[in-house]
Image: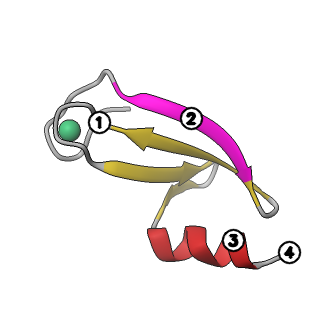
Amino acid sequence: MACTGCAETNLIAIRMRIGTEEVVFQRCNRCEINKWASTDGELSLDEILDLARAK
Ligand SMILES: [Zn+2]
């Protein structure tokens, strides 16, 4: 997966579980964009916060 900001392909990816969802946190070294994705696709920060709140 490439960065949506600068097309950098060497992203840091950290897999973690938030609530009931397995998500991947990605960070771009070049433009410092952070993004979240689940197996279903990209997640917004709001969706991540919802997952963190739901127990
Ligand atoms: Zn980038």
Q: Is mark 3 within 8 Å of ligand 1?
A: no
Label 3 Cα crowd, 10 Å radius (few <14 / some 14-19 / many 20+):
some
Seen as rendered, the residue at the extreme right is 55
Disc 1 on helix, strand or loop?
Answer: loop
Residue 5 position within the rendered picture, expressed as x and y whole percent measured from the top left: 17, 46
* Magenta span main SS: strand
> Which span is picked out in magenta?
11-17
Task: Identify which amino acid the numbered label 3 is placed on.
Answer: Leu
Q: Is residue 52 left or right of residue 33?
A: right
For marks 2 and 3, the one nearer the N-term is 2
For marks 1 and 4, the one nearer the N-term is 1
Nearest to the observer: residue 43 or residue 27: 27
Task: Identify which amino acid the numbered label 2 is placed on.
Answer: Ile
Q: On residue 51, which mark appears?
A: 3
Q: CA distance from mark 2 to mark 1?
A: 12 Å
Whether the residues at callouts 2 and 4 have beta carbons within 8 Å, the answer is no
Seen as rendered, the residue at the extreme top is 10
Disc 2 on helix, strand or loop?
Answer: strand
Q: Which residue is mark 1?
A: 28
Task: Identify which amino acid the numbered label 1 is placed on.
Answer: Cys
For marks 2 and 1, the one nearer the N-term is 2
Residue at screen point 64% across, 37% down? 15
Q: Which residue is mark 2?
A: 14
Q: Is residue 2 left or right of residue 41?
A: left
Residue at screen point 72% across, 78% down? 53
- In the image, is residue 1 part of the stretch drawn in magenta? no
Task: Identify which amino acid the numbered label 4 is placed on.
Answer: Lys
For marks 2 and 4, the one nearer the N-term is 2
Q: Is mark 1 within 8 Å of ligand 1?
A: yes
Q: Which residue is mark 4?
A: 55
